[in-house]
Amino acid sequence: MSFKIRKGEITDMPSVLKLIQELANFEKEPDAVIVTVKDLENDGFGTSPLFKTFVAELDNEIVGMALFYPRYSTWKGPTIHLEDLIVTKSKRGLNIGSALYNKVIEFGYKKGVKRIEWVVLDWNTPAIEFYKKTGAIVLDDWNTAQMNEEGIKSYLEILK
């Protein structure tokens, strides 16, 4: 089976959203996705795009994607955050995920970023082992902190 990795286009966003939902299901958070196709179209292809995508296409069907965006490290300078990389379950094992990963790494290298970073769940051992084999360092001593929309609102209410 021959697949193609290419830059994502606005018309790919319905397929990208399906893959995002599939990833949320895999990560045991099926109800967490609130983003819409329209959000992806506006946020990725508006006047100030917030992210870029690469998609994997097999037989004219989007079967995988990587979504990433620029960040800035006060210690290192420009970086990239790889938000999601997913290959639909029925197409795993065809090296599509590796090809998407390679494309993001290559993109970052060409842009001259100092670091590419992402988050991986501690129970996703196959992904962790893959990343380590490629030379990535999986940090054990940093915890991810998040404040969701409700938390933001509650915190601001406290400040008033």
Image: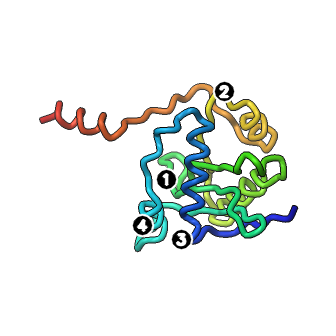
Q: Picture coordinates of residue 60 (x, y %)? A: 73, 70
Q: Picture coordinates of residue 43 (x, y %)? A: 43, 63
**Cα distance between the residues tagged 4 and 2:** 33 Å
Q: Residue at x 76, y 37 (%)?
A: 132
Is the residue marked by circle 4 packed among few (<14), some (14-19), or many (20+) residues within 10 Å? Answer: some
Q: Foreground mark, 2 or 3? A: 3
Cβ–Cβ below 8 Å for labels 2 and 3? no
Q: Residue at x 65, y 50 (%)?
A: 85
Left or right: 101 as drawn, with respect to 82: right
Residue that numbered label 1 is attached to: 72
- Mark sitting on residue 10: 3
Left or right: 98 as drawn, with respect to 19: right
Mark 4 or mark 2: name the one nearer the start of the chain: 4
> Is label 3 in a helix, a strand or a loop?
helix
**Cα distance between the residues tagged 1 and 4:** 23 Å
Residue that numbered label 4 is attached to: 42
Mark 1 or mark 4: name the one nearer the start of the chain: 4
Which quadrant would residue 151 be assigned to in this image? top left
Residue that numbered label 2 is attached to: 123
The three-letter amino acid code for the residue at tag 3 is Ile
> Is label 4 in a helix, a strand or a loop?
helix
The three-letter amino acid code for the residue at tag 1 is Tyr
Q: Picture coordinates of residue 54 (x, y %)? A: 65, 63
Is 136 placed above or below 10 here?
above
Cβ–Cβ below 8 Å for labels 1 and 3? no
Mark 1 or mark 3: name the one nearer the start of the chain: 3
> Is label 2 in a helix, a strand or a loop?
loop
Cβ–Cβ below 8 Å for labels 1 and 4? no
> Is label 1 in a helix, a strand or a loop?
strand
